[in-house]
Image (tube, helix red, strand yellow):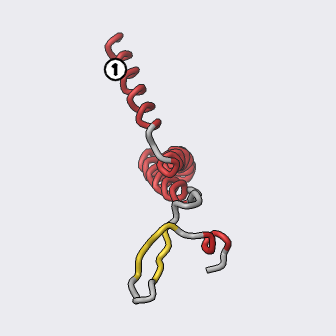
Amino acid sequence: MIIKKAILAVLMTVALAGCETQTEGQQRATTGALLGGAGGALVGQAIGGNTKSTVIGAASGALLGAVVGSATTPQRRGQQLCRYQDRYGQIYTAPCDDRYYNGNY
């Protein structure tokens, strides 16, 4: 019994330590997946009333939550890349300038 508790404590410590090094987008996707999975499981159980519906609801909710969490991550100024064309017709990418952020592009 003590070994099971020790293994559980180690696993939880490793899981929490992995969250520390995530970017903001990864954190938002993880949070969205957790909340979406829990909500999807509740909805699946309420609609279907069986294990299969609960699992399908949890998986669907987790996927949707991860996508929404990742997509709603705000971009910090200076991290957006814009496409530019030089006078010779070459297209290149570079950090966006103030015209992009002010809407004057």
Please, which residue is most extreme toward the top here? 2
Tell me which residue sits at (50%, 45%) in the image: 27
- Answer whether residue 37 is visible to the viewer in this image: no
Q: Is 81 rendered above or below residue 31?
A: below
Q: How many marks?
A: 1
Residue 7: quadrant of the picture: top left
The residue where tag 1 is placed is 7
Q: Nearer the viewer, residue 98 or 44?
A: 98
Q: Residues within 10 Å of mark 1 (few under 14, many from 20)?
A: few
Q: Residue at x 54, y 58 (%)?
A: 68
The x, y position of residue 23, in whole percent, is 48, 47
- Residue displayed at 50% across by 67% down: 95
85 is higher (above) or lower (below) than 66: below
Q: Where residue 16 sits in the image (x, y, percent)? A: 45, 31
Residue at 62%, 74% (x, y): give it.
99
Instruction: Name the element at disc 1.
Output: helix
Q: Nearer the viewer, residue 78 or 31?
A: 78
